[in-house]
Image (tube, grey):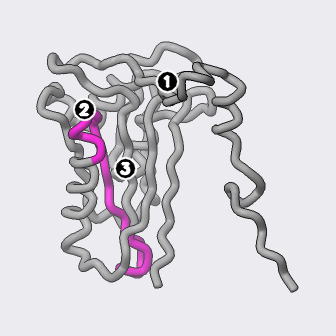
Amino acid sequence: MPCPHNEITIVQRSQRQSAVAAAAYQSGEKLFCEYDQQVKHYPEKRGIVHNEILLPPNAPQEYADRNTLWNAAEAVEKQWNSQLARRWVLTIPREIPPDQYAVLVREFCQKQFVSKGMIADFAIHDPHPPGHNPHAHVLLTMRAMDEHGKWLPKSRKVYDLDEKRGTDKAAVRQMEKPQGGYGGLERPEVL
């Protein structure tokens, strides 16, 4: 039975991370970062079988270039602790034929992200030996594009509370806390 791996992280400037470096790593390309004036390149990275950028219809066509896209995404963020991109690593089931990897990831990204105005940059890795650990790296812009190809403000999380509680911050914090060490499930008793 497949055991899927799914990891979602945020590329953060406060952690000395770079969206340009993340894009260089997942694509295997040599990219120049305008923010720190350094070339980002990971020549030891092997097993990259496909990479692609998916743009919403209203995005400028120059964002089809990886270097232009991620430098623009970093340039719009001015704070020292800015969140630059979302990074998602997910496994691809080994039962899927290798020629279907790109189709699967492309359709997923198109439906879940690009249709909502985000730009998705994805790469499929299948390190040696082939078929052993196929997985996809998806890098997403933090901001969507408006109908004129301009970056929109970052969206905020909205909580749907009933009329009695209003916007009680303590209630919201309580909802965000994991319940117990097992996500609300109690640890089974071991006999």
- Drawn side of residue 168 relative to residue 133, left or right: right
Which portion, as a residue range, is magenta?
112-134
Label 2: state its secondary structure.
loop
Residue 145: horizontal and vertical position, in percent? 25, 24
Which is closer to the viewer, label 3 or label 1?
Answer: 3
Q: Which residue is mark 3?
A: 138
Give the CA separation, mark 2 to mark 3.
15 Å
Give the CA separation, mark 3 to mark 1.
23 Å
Which is closer to the viewer, label 2 or label 1?
Answer: 2
Q: Which residue is mark 1?
A: 36
Residue 126: horizontal and vertical position, in percent? 37, 70
Q: Residue sitting at 32 percent across and 61 percent down?
A: 124
Of callouts 2 and 1, which one flags the residue occurring earlier in the amino acid sequence? 1
Residue 82: horizontal and vertical position, in percent? 53, 23
Numbered label tally: 3
- Nearest to the observer: residue 37 or residue 169: 169
Q: Which residue is mark 2?
A: 117
Kindly identify which numbered label has been placed on residue 8. Answer: none
Which is closer to the viewer, label 2 or label 3?
Answer: 2
Q: Residues within 10 Å of mark 2 (few under 14, many from 20)?
A: many
Q: Residue sitting at 46 percent across and 24 percent down?
A: 156
- Nearest to the observer: residue 126 or residue 92: 92
Does the stretch in magenta take in 127?
yes
- Nearest to the observer: residue 29 or residue 181: 181
Task: Look at the image and tell me in which quarter the C terminus lies.
Answer: bottom right
Q: Amino acid at mark 2?
A: Gly
Q: Residue sitting at 60 percent across and 32 percent down?
A: 16
